[in-house]
């Protein structure tokens, strides 16, 4: 009897551990779909999540039609690439729709790509568009060009979007349309619910619009694309360590600009983050609010530079920037002790940022949202997006802080989120087949202007 019980505990222990981890999450999604495209059966990924295959006749979401699509395996496996969901793919030759029955409400859609060779097809010749319930997510998209432009180098990437499913829909129709004489492919599809008011509010909620010092409104009819999600001053946070939505938070060091990049604070061990009604526990993991990046201890140096991050974004869209803050240093407990300015693209988003004033006390997390328009037109398909922090002269602690950062692209008036394909940053001699198929931040303060000039390296968010 005791032997049988011990055996059952050993067998069930991994499952019980997984359930315990999920039960500790502040949010439980109503919908969670993981589709390993091109796989003949279900399998488990490295994060211990169970993915369904779609390469049999019983596929619930993607119809089997040998004339329009087929399953395939990657010809080779990069050392960084995991088996699930990247080593199989669905190859799509003509317009093809997968249908995902879901409950109403906002959903994350994550598309997984590993540009490789599949059934003799080189993904450098793959260009296609993707729509979801009337929103254009990608247009004439090239995964090959996208991965070639990424720094540091990666072999795979994820594109994350957010759309809302309405009560008269009850389904996400995800449609892949190859460009003329091309094919589409997809390695994995993930659909996860999120809380209704996590990012978009109702139209009574006013977002500061940085360009014109006005307010900006958008609700759940607006679709979003994730540009980045950063654990500022801390390490990566894996998707299973998120608050239930399986978001991945990444280290911010690749986006820092300039020789002075501040100081990373991993937090003291006895900090308890005090979530609230205004900042519920599902907004961001505790690890985001415990760690932070700040300026150094020398106030004279701090007052002569900005703590700055740089991003490359698509032109012609509005962007939502969510900045996460939490004061955890024991010395800072009152308003006015640490005050700093927030600049976005050389425009003042916040002249007197005071985390204690916003949050009400030490260890209380808070986030602030700002919307900025990045103009289109001209010859540039991509433009710089800058975020800079600078301490106020009267601040007792003359160093700005930031705990976390999320940036989202908002769809334009016709429901489009798609930008242009990037220019590759690294020049690699292409194969003959590829050759044939692929043809200053400033800060104003008073009457003085400080100009920071340097070499800018474009960085694209590639991980989710």
Image (tube, helix red, strand yellow):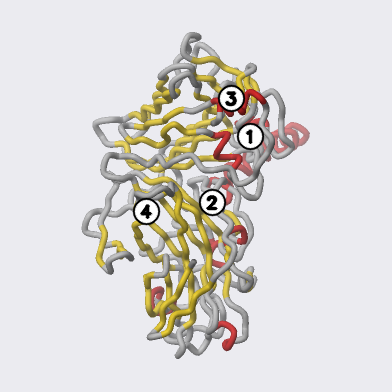
Real-space Cα separation, disc 3 to disc 1, in angstroms: 36 Å
Real-space Cα separation, disc 4 to disc 1, in angstroms: 28 Å
Q: Which label lies toward us, 3 or 4?
A: 3
Q: What element carries label 1?
A: loop
Question: Is disc 3 in contact with disc 4, using a CB cutoff of under 8 Å?
Answer: no
Question: Is disc 3 in contact with disc 1, using a CB cutoff of under 8 Å?
Answer: no
| Picture coordinates of residue 39, whole percent (x, y) | 59, 21
- Considering only order in the chain, which callout, 4 or 3, is on the residue closer to the N terminus? 4
Extreme-right residue of the structure: 3
Q: What element carries label 2?
A: loop
Q: Which of 214 and 206 is in front in this view?
A: 214
Q: Residue at x 53, y 68 (%)?
A: 308
Residues packed near mark 3 inside 10 Å, few (<14), some (14 to 19) or many (20 plus): few
Residue marked by disc 2: 242
Q: In this view, does 150 lie above or below 335?
A: above
Residue marked by disc 4: 199
Q: Is residue 267 visible?
A: no
Residue 107: name its quadrant: top left
Extreme-left residue of the structure: 204
Q: Which residue is drawn at 53% across and 84% down?
A: 303
- Considering only order in the chain, which callout, 3 or 2, is on the residue closer to the N terminus? 2
Q: What element carries label 3?
A: helix
Q: Nearer the viewer, residue 10 or 221?
A: 221
Residue marked by disc 1: 45
Real-space Cα separation, disc 4 to disc 2, in angstroms: 16 Å
| Picture coordinates of residue 7, whole percent (x, y) | 74, 33
Residues packed near mark 2 inside 10 Å, few (<14), some (14 to 19) or many (20 plus): many
| Picture coordinates of residue 79, whole percent (x, y) | 74, 37
Residue marked by disc 3: 436
């Amino acid at each position: 009897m005791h032997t049988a019980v011990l055996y059952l505990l050993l067998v069930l222990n991994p499952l019980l551990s997984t359930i315990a981890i999920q039960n500790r999450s502040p949010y439980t999604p109503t919908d969670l779909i993981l589709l390993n495209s091109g796989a003949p059966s279900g399998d488990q990924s490295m994060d211990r999540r169970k993915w369904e295959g779609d390469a049999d006749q019983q596929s619930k979401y993607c119809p089997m039609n040998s004339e329009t699509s087929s399953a395939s395996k990657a010809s080779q496996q990069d050392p960084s690439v995991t088996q699930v969901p990247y080593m199989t793919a669905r190859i799509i030759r003509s317009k093809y729709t997968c249908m995902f029955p879901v409950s109403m409400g906002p959903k994350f859609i994550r598309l997984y790509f590993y540009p490789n060779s599949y059934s003799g097809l080189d993904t450098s010749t793959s260009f296609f568009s993707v729509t979801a319930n009337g929103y254009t997510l990608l247009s004439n998209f090239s995964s090959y060009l996208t991965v070639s432009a990424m720094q540091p180098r990666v072999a795979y990437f994820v594109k994350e979007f957010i759309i809302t499913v309405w009560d008269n829909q009850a389904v996400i129709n995800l449609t892949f349309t190859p460009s003329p004489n091309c094919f589409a492919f997809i390695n994995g599809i993930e659909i996860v619910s999120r809380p209704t008011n996590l990012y978009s509010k109702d139209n009574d909620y006013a977002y500061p619009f940085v360009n014109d010092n006005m307010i900006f409104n958008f609700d759940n009819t607006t679709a979003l694309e994730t540009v980045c999600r950063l654990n500022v001053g801390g390490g990566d946070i894996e998707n299973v360590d998120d608050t239930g939505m399986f978001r991945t938070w990444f280290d911010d060091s690749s986006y820092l600009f300039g020789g002075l990049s501040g100081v990373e604070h991993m937090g003291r061990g006895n900090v308890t983050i005090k979530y609230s009604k205004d900042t519920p526990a599902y907004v961001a993991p505790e690890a985001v609010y415990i760690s932070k990046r700040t300026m150094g201890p020398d106030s004279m140096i701090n007052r002569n530079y900005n703590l700055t991050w740089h991003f490359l974004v698509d032109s012609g869209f509005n962007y939502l920037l969510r900045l996460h803050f939490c004061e955890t240093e024991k010395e800072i407990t009152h308003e006015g002790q640490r005050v700093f300015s927030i600049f976005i693209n050389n425009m003042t988003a916040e002249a007197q940022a005071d985390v204690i004033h916003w949050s009400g006390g030490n260890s209380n997390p808070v986030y602030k949202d700002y919307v900025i328009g990045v103009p289109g037109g001209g010859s540039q398909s991509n433009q710089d997006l800058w975020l800079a922090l600078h301490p106020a002269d009267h601040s007792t602690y003359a160093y700005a802080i930031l705990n976390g950062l999320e940036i989202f692209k908002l769809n334009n008036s016709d429901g489009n989120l798609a930008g242009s394909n990037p220019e590759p940053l690294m020049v690699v001699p292409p194969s003959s087949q590829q050759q044939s198929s692929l043809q200053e931040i400033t800060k104003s303060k008073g009457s003085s202007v400080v100009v920071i000039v340097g070499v800018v390296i474009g960085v694209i968010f590639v991980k989710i």
